Image: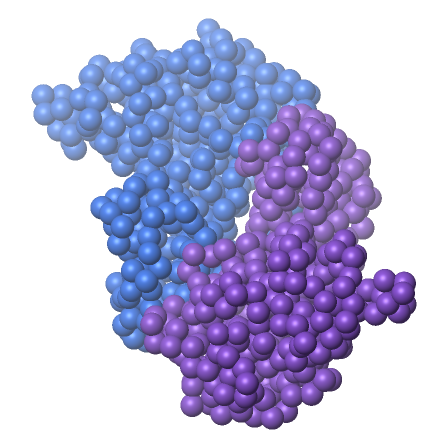
Chain colours: A purple, B blue
C-alpha cells in the first residue's frame, strides 16, 4: 500500500527521537528503478523552509532516487544553518544507501517553524531507516510523517483496474499524505509522496502532477493558512515496464490526489464538518475558485456550519467581497440541496435543511456563465482554537 | 454626549419591539441646522443591504436632516420588498418630524441578514422616537443600535480644546458606533453616526470623513468578515456658527473615528486580546497594509495569541503569502517589543515575551523602505466560535 504499492519502491518509517514523545518521526522512500523520473510541486509561500529550497533544486534535474521526510520540526525560518542541516541530511541518505547521490535526494520536513532540527538524533535515524527499508514499508512511512494528524493517509489506483498490460493495466499509482492544519491553496497540504511503477519520463510526470494538484490539493482550504513546507512529489520507477496512455496516467494521478485531499479535509484539526462548496454558473473558472475560496475562508460562516445553522446570509456577504461576475439580485444558494436563497433573497424554508451529518454541501449559483469549481473546507470549532492555542505547533 | 455633544442635534433611542427580547432597537438622530450638510462612507461589499442602497442615494445630495437606525434586523438580501420597507421608514420619519423630506432621511439597519423587518412595530416606533427627541438623547441612541455589543460606544472632540472661537475652538465633533462582528476593511464597522456643529460644507465633510475612515475603521480587522450594512455618516449643523480650519477639523474627525474604532476592537465578539499590528519599513503604504491584513487574518496566529504563545513562525508564514516587497532572510518580527525573529530566523528568546495583558503588539519589519501602517485585530477564541455558532446572527 501507500508509496510501496507500486513496484520498484521500498520504504521505512521509524522513531528517531526528533519528537519528544517518542512517536515515529522519520520516513524514507527509495526508488529502486530502473527509472528515477520525478516531478514536484511546492508551496507558493515566499517564506520557504530549507527542505523546500533544497528539493526544488533537486527536482530541476527531473531525477529523485530517495525522499527523506521528518515530522517533529519544519526546519523553516532557521537561516543558513537550517539549510546546512537539510544538506547534511541528504548527504547522510546518499551515504547510507550507497551508490546514491545527495543531489538526487529530496528532503521534506514538517512541524514547528523556527526551531533547528536535532541532527544528533536525525542522522543516526537515517541509518536506521535505511536498514529497515522493505517493499511493504509504505504504511510505516505514512505513519512517521504525521504531526497533528489523527490518522495516516494513503491511497492507490491501478491502471486499467486489475487488468494486465494488454488491457492497458499492470501499473499502479500509490501515495501517502500528511496535513491537518495550515491547509490552504497554493499548495493545500503539507507533505505528499506519490509513486508509480509506470514508465513515465519526468516531463510527463510534471504535466500530470500539476494538472492533478490544481484541482485537488489546491482546492482544499481548511483554515486559510498557507504552509512554508508544502511539498508534493511524484516518483516513477518504471518497474512495471509499461508505458501508460498519458490521459489514463494523468487520471490515475488525479484520482489518488483527490482521494488524499479528501482525507486531509476529513482529518483537519478540530473540525466537526467537511464543507463541499460548489460554485456553478460562473463566468470563468477563476471566478468560481475566487468565490469558493471566499466562502471557504469566512469565519462567521464556518462557525454557523459548526452550529448546524444554514445561515445563507453569511454566504452572500462572502460572495459580495469578490470581484467575480454576478448580479446580487440573481444569486442563488443551496445548503444540502435546499435552495434557501433565490435571486439574492429569501428562498425555500431554511428549516428544511438537515445538517446533522459531517459532510455539508453549499452550492452557490452565480447565474453568470457555465463554469464551475469545487472547494473543500472545514467548519470553525472551539476544538480548532484549543488545538492551536494550547501549545506551539 | 455622543451624537448630541455638538449643538444643533437631537436624538432618541427606544424599544420598538423589533428585538424579541425587548431591548432598545431604534435610534433617531435629527439635525436641526441651520446647516444640513452631510457625508457618508458605505460598505464596499457588493451585496448591499437595502438601507445602504437607499442612504447612498440620499448622500449624493450632500444633505441629511435625520438618520433612523434600527438593530434587530439588517434588512439585507430581502429583495425589492426590503427596499420598500426602507423607503417607507424614511417616509415615516419625514412625516413624524414635519417639514422634513424623505429624500434627506438616511436609514441604517443592523442584525440578521435575510429577514424582513417587522414594519408593524418599526413604524409606530418611529413616531415614539420622534416624540422623545432631546438634545441629550445621544447616549440612548447609542444604546439602541447595539446588537452583540456588550457596551455602547461614543466619542467626542472639541475643536481647540475648551477654547472659544477666538482660539479656533467653540465647535465639537461627536459620534456613536456599534459593531462587534463582521469587522473587516472596506468598511470595518457596522454603523457609525458622527455629528458636528462646525459650519462645514458637504464636500469638505466628505474629504475629512474619507481621510479619517481610511486609516481608522478601514484598518480594523476583527474577523476578516465584511458586512453588508456598514455605514459611517458625518452630519454638520453649523449651529456653532464657526467655520473651522479644515486641517483642524479633519484631525478632530480622525480622532473621533480612531477612538470609536479602538472601542470596536476592544468589544469584539468573544475576543480576549486586542492585537496592534504595525508593519514598518515597507516599500509602500499599500505593502504595509497588505502585510498587516494578512497577519490580522491568520487564524493560526490568532489562536496562538489567544494562547499567549509568541509564535512568530505563523507571522512569517502569513507575510510569505503577500506580494509585498521583502526578502525572506531580512524579515524581523517583534512581539511586545521583543525581537523574536531577526533576519528571517530565530532572534531574541521568546520566553522574554510577556503576553498576559489584553493588548498585544506585533511589529513586522519588512526592511524594504520607509512606509508603515497599523492594523488592529483580535484573537480567535472558543467564545467567538460559541457566539457565532450557537444561534443565527
Question: Could you say where residue B78 lies in the image, as x and y percent from the top left?
Answer: 67, 28
Compared across the picture, whether A334 is left or right of B214 comes to right
- Location of residue B1 with respect to B329 vertically, above or below: above
Q: Position of residue B332 (x, y in %)?
A: 29, 61
Q: Foreground residue, A158 or A307?
A: A158
Please determine whether, in this image, residue B176 is positioned above or below residue B52: below
Residue B124 sits in quarter: top right
Q: Residue A295 occupies which quadrant of the picture?
A: top right
Residue ID at (43%, 56%): A46
- The residue most toward the left is B166
**In the displayed structure, does residue A329 sit left or right of residue B252?**
right
Task: Give the total number of marks visible in the rendering.
Answer: 0
Residue at horizontal 29 percent and vertical 71 percent from the top = B347
Q: Is residue B103 left or right of residue B83?
A: left
Residue at left 48%, top 74%?
Answer: A103
Examine the rendering and report whether any part of residue B332 can be seen: yes
Q: At 48% across and 36% down in the image, what residue appears?
A: B190
Q: Is residue A383 visible?
A: no
Between residue A297 and residue A50, name the one nearer to us.
A50
Of B16 and B280, nearer the camera is: B280
Q: Position of residue A241 (x, y in %)?
A: 77, 71
Q: Can you name the residue that lies furthest to the top here?
A: B99
Q: Quadrant of the N terminus of chain A?
A: bottom right
Amino acid at each position: 500500500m501507500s508509496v510501496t504499492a507500486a513496484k520498484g519502491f521500498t520504504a521505512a518509517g521509524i522513531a528517531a527521537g526528533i519528537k519528544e514523545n517518542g512517536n515515529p518521526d522519520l520516513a524514507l522512500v527509495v526508488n529502486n528503478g530502473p527509472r528515477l523520473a520525478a516531478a514536484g510541486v511546492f508551496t507558493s509561500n515566499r517564506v520557504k523552509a530549507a527542505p523546500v529550497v533544497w528539493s526544488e533544486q533537486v527536482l530541476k534535474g527531473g531525477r529523485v532516487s530517495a525522499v527523506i521526510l521528518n515530522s517533529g520540526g519544519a526546519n523553516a525560518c532557521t537561516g543558513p544553518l537550517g539549510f546546512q542541516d537539510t544538506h547534511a541530511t541528504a548527504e547522510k541518505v546518499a551515504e547510507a544507501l550507497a551508490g546514491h547521490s545527495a543531489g538526487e535526494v529530496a528532503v521534506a520536513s514538517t512541524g514547528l517553524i523556527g526551531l533547528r532540527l536535532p541532527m544528533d538524533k536525525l542522522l543516526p535515524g537515517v541509518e536506521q531507516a535505511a536498514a529497515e527499508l522493505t517493499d511493504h514499508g509504505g504504511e510505516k512511512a505514512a505513519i512517521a510523517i504525521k504531526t497533528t494528524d489523527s490518522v495516516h493517509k494513503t491511497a492507490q489506483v491501478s491502471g486499467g483496474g486489475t487488468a494486465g498490460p494488454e488491457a492497458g493495466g499492470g501499473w499502479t499509482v500509490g501515495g501517502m499524505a500528511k496535513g491537518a492544519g495550515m491547509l490552504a491553496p497554493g499548495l493545500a497540504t503539507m507533505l505528499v509522496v506519490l509513486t508509480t511503477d509506470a514508465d513515465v519520463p519526468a516531463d510527463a510526470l510534471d504535466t500530470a502532477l500539476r494538472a492533478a494538484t490544481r484541482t485537488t490539493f489546491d482546492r482544499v482550504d481548511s483554515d486559510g493558512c498557507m504552509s512554508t513546507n508544502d511539498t508534493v512529489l511524484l516518483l516513477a520507477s518504471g518497474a512495471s515496464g509499461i508505458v501508460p496512455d498519458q490521459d489514463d496516467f494523468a487520471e490515475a494521478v488525479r484520482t489518488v490526489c483527490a482521494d488524499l485531499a479528501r482525507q486531509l479535509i476529513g482529518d483537519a484539526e478540530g473540525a466537526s464538518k467537511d464543507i463541499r462548496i460548489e460554485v456553478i454558473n460562473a463566468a470563468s473558472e477563476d471566478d468560481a475558485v475566487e468565490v469558493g475560496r471566499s466562502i471557504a475562508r469566512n469565519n462567521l460562516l464556518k462557525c454557523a456550519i459548526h452550529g448546524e445553522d444554514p445561515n445563507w446570509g453569511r454566504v452572500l456577504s462572502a460572495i459580495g467581497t469578490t470581484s467575480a461576475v454576478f448580479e446580487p439580485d440573481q444569486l442563488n444558494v443551496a445548503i444540502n440541496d435546499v435552495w434557501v436563497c433565490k435571486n439574492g433573497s429569501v428562498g425555500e424554508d431554511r428549516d428544511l435543511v438537515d445538517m446533522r451529518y459531517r459532510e455539508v454541501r453549499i452550492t452557490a449559483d452565480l447565474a453568470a456563465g457555465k463554469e464551475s469549481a469545487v472547494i473543500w473546507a472545514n467548519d470553525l470549532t472551539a476544538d480548532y482554537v484549543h488545538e492551536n492555542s494550547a501549545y506551539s505547533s
